Image (spheres, grey):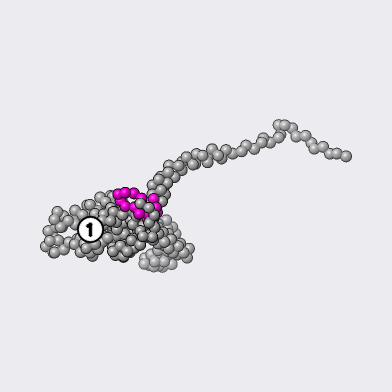
Amino acid sequence: MSVTAPLIPAEMTPPPRRRRRTSGRAGIGWLYALPTALFVLFLFILPLLLVFKMSASDWPLLGGDQGWNFPENYASAISNRFFLDSVLFTLKYTVLATILLIGLGLGLALLVQESSRWKGFLRASFLIPSALGLASASLLFYVLYSPIAGPFAELTQAWGFTFLGTPDAALWSTLFLIVWRYAGFYMLLMLVGLQGIPDEVYEAARIDGSSRWQTFRHVTIPLLKPTLALTTVLCVTGSLLAFEQFYILTKGGPDNSTITVVQLIYSVAFQGQNDLGVAGALSVIVLAALVVINIVQIRGFSRKVED
């Protein structure tokens, strides 16, 4: 005995599912990403590979690749007479610049966060120097610091002081330039972080009877840790790669006391030795140090943020 299934009318049959044309959308997505991919390829990946090749080759400035020279370039880079001094000075400058920029940026953000009639004017005033290029700002301060043509020339001559005449004066004069140039930028980052803190948290702290200092210490700083992590990574990375300000203001002087690591790379490549191989080895060393330092910073801050 067989049972036949009932016939379903054709008009009641569900239409076949159409396959989504994802290939076309994927192709459009790749087209949108293509300019950025080409930019990264030609301006980052290929130059990076070329630097690695230079660091392992005998590569004079004039003459091109002369053959494999892997260990010698790194040995010459480390044994350079300015290598250790440049590393120590760069670390010293990085610590001072990071403390000054983050501290002043947070202070300015707290100042302009309060609603007042001067809030817009103060924000614009602090942020305007950030629109000026670092090289242009360095040239401006070079004229200001000039003991001959600068506006403070008579005062410095009368007091026997020069802005760039001693190692300590040159360092602090350059730090003043950096703080003037970048404080507004870090103020903006801090301000965004402060505005992301809910008002209800501050209201609860006031109800509990917390003072301003207690609120700042136990509420603002813990909730601002992601922003502090970002600003610290940016500031440390930028300070370790400092070049323009010292090259324009001090030229590494006085007495080679303000040579940064990037200045040393430039000097080895285009001045004195004219050796791109040793300069490439120095660049790889700096890159490796930056990667390690950034990994340590990010892991340390991520643990603090989770806590």
Q: Residues within 10 Å of mark 1 (few under 14, many from 20)?
A: many
Residue 139 visible in the shown view: yes
Please identify the quarter of the rendering in which residue 255 is found: bottom left
159 or 186, which is in the foreground?
159
Q: Residue at x 84, y 39 (%)?
A: 3
Of 220 and 46, the residue lying toward us: 46
Q: Main secondary structure of the magenta part?
A: loop
| Most distant residue in the right direction | 1
Looking at the image, which residue sits at the far front? 67
Q: Is residue 226 magenta?
A: no
Q: Residue at x 17, y 56 (%)?
A: 146
Q: Where's the N terminus, which quadrant?
A: top right
In this view, the residue in front, 179 or 169, is: 169
Residue at image location 36% in from the left, 67% down from the top? 213
The quadrant where residue 35 appears: top left
Q: In the figure, is residue 136 to the left or right of 48?
A: left
**Residue 116: percent from the left, percent from the top?**
31, 55
Across and down, in percent, residue 256 comes to 24, 62
Identify whether 120 is placed above or below 107.
Answer: above
Please indicate, yes or no, whether residue 301 appears anywhere in the rendered image: no
Q: Position of residue 298 (x, y in %)?
A: 43, 61
**Boundaries of the magenta span:** 50-65
Which amino acid, mark 1? Thr
Left or right side of 300 for 20: right
Left or right: residue 225 compared with residue 185? right
SS state under label 1: loop
In depth, the one of 56 and 93 nearer the eye is: 56
Decide if residue 196 is on the left or right side of residue 150: right
Residue on which disc 1 sits: 250
Return the x and y of residue 25 as percentages of the image width and height.
Answer: 53, 39
Q: Quadrant of residue 89?
A: bottom left
Give the residue drawn at x 49%, y 41%: 29
